[in-house]
Image (cartoon, rainbow, N blue to C red):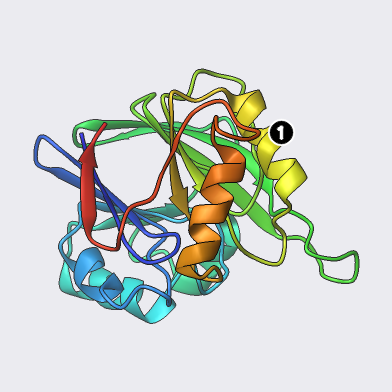
Amino acid sequence: MQLTKYNHATVVLEQDGTTLVLDPGAFTPEAADLVRSATAVLVTHEHPDHLDVDAVRAGLDANPELVVRGPRPVVDQLGEHDGRVVAVEAGDTFSIGAFDVRVFGEQHAVIHPDVPTIPNVGYLVDDTVFHPGDAYLVPGVPVPTLLMPTSGPWTHTVEAVDYVREVQPERVVQIHEAMLSELGQQSTARFLGPDMLGTVPVTILASGESITV
């Protein structure tokens, strides 16, 4: 499949005519266009850097074939749109076009004890690419390509290193990097990679850059 990275948490997967958009958030200027042309949108949680509500609603209105999956609060914000927007939770499995998807969960990482946690799920697409949302979520199954969050108020280097070690992916692709400078991204990739504390190299993709996985 082709994996294309966009700003922050947004990733597009394409295979055999099916296009999945994961976490089209407000940090991604192209979000509305990506959603409009997608087969499906998968949302890990309701935070605006992962869910641009206006962009997804516009896509649902423009494309009557578009379907959306996400935790219950995502459905509550978007509305069900005649059954095209469906809540998912850990343990669910479903197919969309050429892709099979498994759902893991269930909570956003703790930002601070005073900040309530919210539902957060991770998606393993075709047993190949895993997007954990905002959590160091270990699926407990093989993960060839891990989309690794590297910035945010909940991230911690020690936990990030241990997370990569526990998941043991074949490849790590950096996401959720908007709060890091270019130097910060490179530094974090070194910490998480085999030159320092990690086990596999960390790939840094520019917005709009694609790789085959």
- Residue 161: percent from left, percent from top: 67, 38
- Residue 118: percent from left, percent from top: 71, 60
Element marked by disc 1: helix
Would residue 173 be visible to someone looking at this image? yes
Say whether residue 88 is left or right of residue 35.
right
Q: At x 59% / y 40%, what residue is drawn?
A: 192
Query: Of residues 132 and 191, which is closer to you in this image?
Result: 191
Question: Quick one: quadrant of the C terminus?
Answer: top left
Instruction: Say what amino acid the circle numbered 1 marks.
Output: Asp
**Residue 111, above or below 12:** below
Say whether residue 37 is left or right of residue 154.
left
Number of residue marks: 1
Question: Quick one: quadrant of the N terminus?
Answer: top left
**Residue 18, above or below 95:** below
Q: Residue furthest right?
A: 113
Q: Residue furthest left?
A: 17
Q: Quadrant of residue 27?
A: bottom left
Q: At x 59% / y 64%, what residue is drawn?
A: 73
Query: Of residues 108 and 56, which is closer to you in this image?
Result: 108
Would residue 149 be visible to someone looking at this image? no
Q: Residue furthest top?
A: 142
The residue under label 1 is 162
Query: Of residues 44 and 203, which is closer to you in this image?
Result: 203
Packing grade of label 1 (10 A; few <14, some 14-19, many >=20) is some
- Residue 134: percent from left, percent from top: 61, 54
Say whether residue 142 is left or right of residue 210.
right
Q: Residue furthest bottom?
A: 54
